[in-house]
Image (spheres, rainbow, N blue to C red):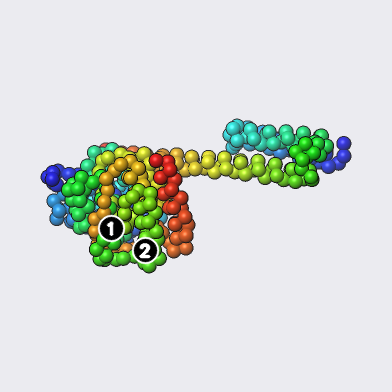
Amino acid sequence: MVRVQVIAIVTSLLFLANVAYLIHKGRLREEYAFIWIISTFFLIGFSVWREAFDTMAHLFGVYSPPNLIFTGAIFAVLIYLLHLSVTVSKMQQQNKTLAQHQALLQQKISQLKK
Amino acid sequence: MTDKSTIKVAVIIPAYNEEASIATVVGAIHAAGKNAGVNYVPVVVNDCSKDRTGKIIDTLDCIALHLPINLGIGGAVQTGIKYAFENGFEYAVQVDGDGQHPAEQIIHLLEACEHNKWDVAIGSRFITNEGFQSTFMRRVGISYFEWLLLLLTGKRVKDSTSGMRMMNRRTLSLLTTYYPDEYPEPEAIILYAKNNLSFGEVPVHMNERLGGVSSIRSFGSVYYMFKVTLAIIFSYIRG
């Protein structure tokens, strides 16, 4: 095992530990943590098996393995960002409904107090 | 035509930092109601104002709705629509909090709804071309929406950005389920058409605003055109 592999594996494990910590503290919901845990396993996997990218690049017919990494990673990030935008839109909608409901209830309460 | 004095009309006033003009606007609505012999109930929606708007409306003779967070014009108006629908109002009309829409013109919208059996009456500045006519760039934008809406609904609406609208219960019921957040006016016309609501325009005379700033700022106008075009097209497709 060469030095870069050790560094990559240690970094990945630290990342995984951080994700676990965030879940433990209740600051990250499990469904969102899922994707981070999966990516960490990918990182560890590729750190251990260094030839994986060459093999896969060859399989996909990509000339240079780093290109495959960039294409794959950017695509995955874009999809995840779209998912987050959908989540934000949904939360905005829920927020709006809650705020309106609260305003209407507050008016009812002050009416009753009179 | 039914007896006007038995009709309850909610006058929805979305207010964001309107401390300078809100008391005048509410007062004008009461006066106009008395003049017209119609029961106008001002419903002021305080969209989390940073100034004293909230405190002022609590002392006025009106229904005061306080939003805990700023929702923007569409969310604020929808709060008023929900209030009007839940509390059995026959009609609700949206009037701006800055004095642009004169209260004495509300009656014309109500009469148009009653007389023509319309579900929505839109107050338009561009039928008789009287009163405050907005800026040149805004009129260009309004012509573009007129064309876009004509293409999609087959109906000509000359002043699609006018917020002054009289809505009956059928319309209120529809809009409680969905109302656009930002710049809702042109998109709402697609909703009316898609849901087979009858609507038309009534000439009104608008003033220049008494205070506050328009929700459409000049640097945001490109975004405005783009956002509203998208919203109109998607509302049309969604059906």
The type of residue carrying mark 2 is Arg
Give the residue displayed 61% in from the left and 41% down from the top.
A79
Mark 2 and mark 1 in contact (Cβ < 8 Å)? no
x then y, percent, for residue A58: 80, 39
**For residue A32, which quarter of the picture?**
top right
Q: Is residue B143 above or below residue B174?
A: below
**For residue B212, which quarter of the picture?**
bottom left
The answer to whether residue A28 is left or right of residue A1 is left
x then y, percent, for residue B222: 47, 60
Pick out the residue farthest to the right: A2
**For residue B134, which quarter of the picture?**
bottom left
x then y, percent, for residue B65: 32, 46
B87 and B169: which is toward the camera: B169
The type of residue carrying mark 1 is Ser
Q: Which mark is residue B177?
A: none
Could you tell which of marks 1 and 2 lies nearer the N-terminus? 1
Q: Secondary structure at mark 1?
A: strand
Give the residue displayed 21% in from the left and 57% down from the top.
B105
Q: Is residue B120 above or below residue B143?
A: above
Give the residue displayed 39% in from the left and 59% down from the top.
B144
Quarter of the N terminus of chain B within the rendering? top left
Q: Which mark is residue B124?
A: 1
Q: Is residue B128 above or below residue B166?
A: below
The answer to whether residue B50 is left or right of residue A44 is left
Q: Which mark is residue B139?
A: 2
Give the residue displayed 57% in from the left and 43% down from the top.
A82
Q: Chain of mark 1?
A: B
